Amino acid sequence: MGAGKTRIAVIGAGAAGMTAAGTAASCGADVTVFEKNRVPGKKLAITGKGRCNVINNCTVPEFLENVPRNPKFLYTAVSGFSPADIMDFFEGLGVRLKTERGRRVFPCSDRAGEIVDALYRYSESAGASFVFDKVRGIERAGEGFEIRLSDGGTEWFDRVILATGGLSYPLTGSDGDGYVFAGRLGHGLIEPRGSLVPLEADRDICSPLMGLTLKNIVFSAADDKGREVYSEFGEMLFTHFGISGPVVLSASAHMDFSKGSRYTAKIDLKPALDMKTLDRRILSDFSKYANRDASNALDDLLPKKLILPMLSFCGIDPHKKVNLITKEERRRLLENLKSLSIRILGARPVREAVITSGGIPVKEIDPKTMQSKLVPGLYFAGEIIDCDGYTGGYNLGIAFSTARLAGKSAAGSSGTGKNSLSGSGQDKKGKRKTMKIAIDGPGGAGKSYLAKQIAKRLGIIYVDTGALYRTVGLAVKRAGIDPHDTEGVVSLLGTFSIEMEHNDNGQSVLLDGEDVGGLIRTQEISMYASAVSAIPKVREYLFSAQREIAEKNSVVMDGRDIGTVILPDADVKIFLTASPETRAMRRFLELKEKGPDVTYEQVLSEMTERDRNDSTREVAPAVAAEDAVVLDNTDLDGEATADRAVEIIREKTEGKNF
Ligand code: DC
C-alpha cells in the first residue's frame, strides 16, 4: 500500500466492480474490493445462459438507442468506453470474441467463466486486492468513509465505489444492500422492479402449451389503449405461468405494470405469409388431408403441441372431418394463426428478472464522473444506477462503461475519454478535396436509403447511378427496341441526351431535357434497365457522366460497380449486403404495400436468381471491391445501418482534408 495513494473501496466484485477496481488501480489508486460471495463474478458467470453476452457490437448512438431509461445520463460513460473499446479491452486481456445474430458479442469459448477470469486477473494484476467478506455498513468519516465488516472491525477509505448490482437473481448476491448503504448516506431510490423479465399471462392458453418454443414468429404487445409498445421477430416460449424467451424478455422492458396498465400480446405465427396466401395454404392442406380429422390436418402448418390447443382456441372440434370444417371456422383459424391473442397479467417478480430497473436516481449522480452529487467521494457503477437497456449485451455494456468512468474519476484522473466521432480534418490552406464514397451491393440491401442518409448527414451529393440505366431503359422502350437486342440498343446511344441535376431535393434525371424521375421506377423499366446494363457499350456510354460528377463534387454514389469500375479510387467503399431472406422480406413488404399480388417465396426466388445474374455477368459484375468494407445489415434497421456507415466513413477519412 503506497503512502499518499488514494484509498478506494469497491463494494461488489461483479462486472462493474472488477472493471472499476482494475481501472482505479491502473490509475495509481490503492484499491480493495469487498465481495460477500466467496468468489467474484457469480452473476456474471450465469449471464447469457452461461455464455456471457459481453457487449453489443454497435456504435455509441445505437447503444444509447437501446437504453430506454436515462440514456442521456450514459453519454459520457459510453462515449469514453464504447462498445468497440470494450471489445478491444477484452481482446487485450486475451479473450477471443465473436459476434452473433443481433450483433451480440460472446467469448469464442462460449464460457462466461472466461470473462469472469479475465476481469479478475485484470483487476488483481493492476494491484487491486480482494476481501471476500460481507460489508455491514458504510459511514462518513471526516472526508472519507469507514467500512464496517462482519467481524465488527472497520477500515478507512478516501473513496467508495458502490457496484453492488440490483435485485435480480438474489442467490448470486444481488440482494439490494447497495441501496441500503446509499440510502443511509442520503440517497433516494427509484423503486426497483424487474426488467427483461418473464410475463404472467392467460393460463388457459399458456398452461397447455408449457414447454413449447416458437421460432420465427412476430411478437407484438399493445397497452390497454391499443397502442403498440413492442413488435419484434424472434423466438419465445410458453411456461407454466405464462410466457418467456428472448422477444418476451425484450418486450417486458417496454411495459410498466406499476400504474395498473395492462397489456395484450399478439403472436403472428406465420409472419412471412399474408392472410390471403395463408388462407390458400390452409385450403390446400385441407384438400390434401380432406378425409382426416381436423387434429391430423395441421401438421404442415403448426408444431404438434400447438395443434389441439389451436383448434380449441378456434372452437373447432378436433374430431371433425376436415371437409366438414365451415368457412367461419376456417376464418377463425386464419385469424388465430396471424394474431393469436394472449392477455398479459403482469411481470414475474424482480428476482426472476435478468436485470433490475430502478435504483439510485440519475439526477443524484454526476454523469461526467459517476460521483454522487450528494456525498463527495461516493461513486456508483453498474446496475445499482437507475439505467437499463434491452437484451443484447447493453446491460453489461452499461456496467463496463459506468465502471470505467467511476474507476478513473475516483482515482483522480479525468473521466472523459477518446472515441470522439469528430469528422475529418480541415485543410489549413482552405483547399478542399472532393470526397468520394462508393456504395455497392445486391438488391434489397437498402443502398439508396443508406446513400441518401449519408448525403444528408455529410452534406454531400447523392448520385443514384441506377437511375441512369433506367433512363437508358426508358429511351430504349420509347424507341420500341427490344432491350436484349444489343445492336439495336447500341445504335440508339448518342441519339438522345441524359443529364443529371442535383439540388437539395435530391437528384433529377433528364431525358432530352424532360424530367423522367417519375417514369423510371416501374417494374417494366426495371427489366429494361437490367437488360441494357449488361451491354458493355451502354456502360461505357454512362461511364464519363458518372466520373465527371465525382471529379467536381463530394459524392456518395450507389450502384453495382462503383467501387470496382466507376470510382476505384473512392475514399470509402462500402459493400452493403444482408441475407437473401432478409432482403427478400424487405422487398416483399415494400411490394405488398404497393399492392401487387406476390408471395414471399416468389420474391426470394427472383432475388436469388438476380443475385446470381448480377454477380456473374461478364461486364462489371456486382461484387465487392477488394478494399470495400462489407456491411451486413441483416440485423440492422435503416438508421442503425446509416450510423454504422457514417462511423466507417469517419474511420476511413480521419486525417484527410475534405
Ligand atoms: O439500383 P437500380 O435498381 O435502380 O438499378 C437499375 C438497374 O441498373 C439494375 O438492374 C442494375 C443496373 N445497374 C448497374 O448495372 N450498375 C450500376 N452502377 C447501377 C445499376
Image (cartoon, rainbow, N blue to C red):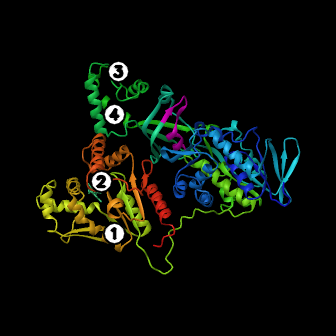
Residue 604 position in % (x across, y down): 31, 43
* Number of other residues with Cα within 10 Å of mark 1, as a class: few under 14, some 14 to 19, many 20 or more: few
* Residue 8 in view in this figure: yes
Q: Which residue is mark 1?
A: 505
Q: Is the residue under label 1 in contact with that under label 3 (CB below 8 Å)?
A: no
Q: Residue at x 62, y 43 (%)?
A: 355
- Label 4 near ligand 1 (CB < 8 Å): no
Residue type indicated by callout 1: Asn
Q: Quadrant of residue 496?
A: bottom left
Report the magenta residues as a range. 236-252
**Placement of 210 over or under 439, stated as above or below:** above
Q: Which residue is mark 3?
A: 296
Q: Quadrant of ligand 1?
A: bottom left
Closer to the chain start, of discs 1 and 4, is: 4
What distance separates the C-alpha of mark 2 from that of mark 3?
Answer: 50 Å
Label 2's element? loop
Q: Which residue is mark 4?
A: 334
Label 3's element? helix
* Number of other residues with Cα within 10 Å of mark 4, as a class: few under 14, some 14 to 19, many 20 or more: some
Label 4's element? helix
Queried whether the magenta region covers residue 656, the answer comes back as: no
Residue 594 position in % (x across, y down): 27, 51
Closer to the chain start, of discs 4 and 3, is: 3
What distance separates the C-alpha of mark 1 from that of mark 4?
Answer: 44 Å
Closer to the chain start, of discs 3 and 1, is: 3
Closer to the chain start, of discs 4 and 2, is: 4
Q: Which residue is mark 2?
A: 621
- Label 2 near ligand 1 (CB < 8 Å): no
